[in-house]
Each structure stands twice: as C-alpha cells, then as structure tokens.
Image (cartoon, grey):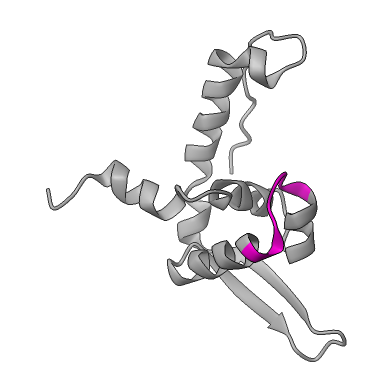
Amino acid sequence: MKCCPIDTTFKLVGKKFTILIIREMMQKKTRFNQFVDHIEGVNPKILSARLKEMEQTGLIKRKVYSYEMPVRVEYFLTEKGRALKSILDQMAIFSMQYCAKDVFKDGKPRTLEIEVQ
C-alpha cells in the first residue's frame, strides 16, 4: 500500500466541523446561514474555510444564483460527499450504543433506523 486508507479518509473529513457540515447537507441544508445556525460553535470565518476546502477536495459543489438579488449561494454534496453517509451512520450507531449517557437525557442505549436509498 502507498498509505493508510483510514488516514487518507481522515485527512479529508477530520478537520473540525467538516463532518458536521456534511451531516447538515445530508439533512437538506444548503445555505451558509443554515450551517451557522445548526452547527454549534462554528463561526463564519472557519465555516467559509471549511466549505472552500471541501469544494477543493471534491466533497461538495457550490452553486451561485447570480441572477437573483441578493445573489444566492448554495452548497451540495457530490457523489464523493454522499458516499460518506454510511460512515456517518456508523458513527451515530456507535455513539447511540456506547456513549448513550452523553447522547441521550435518559442515558439508555438505542439503535438507529437507517433509511435505505
């Protein structure tokens, strides 16, 4: 092998807020202010940097609606970005089962119903 495949993936998604941005996009959020409103602790400067990095690595695409006033910008997952869904699902399953005290008010483990696409 040339390098570790896990490390390669982590280099793509391991920076702070990247996974959370992907999560929000999977929940149909596409606008900058939606990300600011739904991702705890993110500030506009960091969010802007992450979105640019994600676009450069091919995880997302940016669409500008320049014919609208004011100009509207939306972000969408590429096929590469959407392929991370199963990884995010597994992370959620792990936390719901093994970190239930941190995730749920009642601290009881749960399972995740995953919708098949």
Left or right: 15 with respect to 1?
A: right
**Is there any visible trace of residue 110 in the rendered image?**
no
Is residue 71 positioned above or below 28 on the image? below
Query: Which stretch appears magenta?
Result: 38-45
- In the rendered image, residue 10, in percent from the top left (x then y), is placed at 38, 46
Q: Residue placed at 71% from the left, 71% from the top? A: 74
Q: Which residue lies furthest to the right in this view?
A: 69
- In the rendered image, residue 69, in percent from the top left (x then y), is placed at 87, 87
**Is there any visible trace of residue 88 in the rendered image?**
yes
- In the rendered image, residue 40, in percent from the top left (x then y), is placed at 72, 44
Q: Residue placed at 52% from the left, 22% from the top? A: 94
Left or right: 86 with respect to 62?
A: left
Task: Compare residues 79 and 50 and report the one nearer the observer.
Answer: 50
Q: Which residue lies furthest to the bottom in this view?
A: 67
On whether residue 42 falls in the magenta region, the answer is yes
Query: Residue 47 is drawn in which quadrant?
Result: bottom right
